[in-house]
Image (cartoon, rainbow, N blue to C red):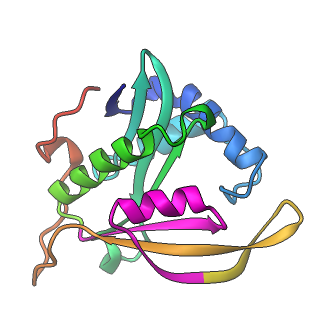
Amino acid sequence: MIVRFAASDDAAAIAALYAPFVEGSAVSMEDSAPTPEEMAVRIAGGGELYPWLVADEDGRVAGFASASRFRPRQGYRFTVETSVYVVPDRQGAGLGRALYTALIDLLVRQGFTQAIAALTEPNPGSAGLHRAMGFKKCGTYGQVGWKLDRWWDIGLWQCPLAPQRTPPQEPIPYRDAGLKLPG
């Protein structure tokens, strides 16, 4: 297994991997799974600052992790929102940890100061992974997600990344951050 940068060619595999989380669970609050074309737009939409990574097992995308803008207001530009998804038959095999390790290392090198993750509750597997990666639960939005005929809580998790400087340095593009990954 290698962790590498996602490419537009991975969009169909990422969309297929993500679809069951959308269509058959409350892990994602999306109502319909994105098409491969929509997923390609999301990957490209990360631009130079927000990387997408995949776990590649002999040419099969077995997981992905991504960073995205936390909030649109300029004052939040030093914080990112992260997510990670692994195919069900490889959960618990270390792929989520490998993806998050590479992603967090990259975000630190870029100069981001905080990572935020939002987890539908309950989700003990994801909570355990986030805890192991240095995230701490910092709050809960109570019953804000409606899916599968019920209300869901969303747990908020936060991980400190690079030191906060005054004034802060602008985050740099991920390709310039010095972490060498294939892709």
Residue 71 appears at what percent x and percent y? 44, 72
| Depth check, front residue: 51 or 74 | 51
Residue lying at 41% horizontally and 34% vertically, measured from the top left: 54
Where residue 55 sits, quadrant-wise, is top left
Magenta run includes residue 117:
yes
Q: Is residue 12 above or below residue 87?
A: above
Left or right: where 153 falls relative to 92: right
| Depth check, front residue: 169 or 155 | 155
The residue most toward the right is 149
Q: Which residues are magenta?
A: 113-140
Magenta run includes residue 162:
no
Residue lying at 66% horizontally and 56% vertically, measured from the top left: 27
Tell me the quadrant of the picture where the N terminus can be found. top left
Left or right: where 13 falls relative to 81: right
Residue 12 appears at what percent x and percent y? 58, 26
| Depth check, front residue: 29 or 42 | 29
Residue lying at 66% horizontally and 67% vertically, measured from the top left: 122
Left or right: where 110 falls relative to 151: left
Tell me the quadrant of the picture where the C terminus can be found. top left
Where residue 169 sits, quadrant-wise, is bottom left
| Depth check, front residue: 134 or 92 | 92
Q: How many marks?
A: 0
Where residue 136 sits, quadrant-wise, is bottom left
Residue lying at 71% horizontally and 48% vertically, measured from the top left: 22
Q: Is residue 141 above or below residue 19?
A: below
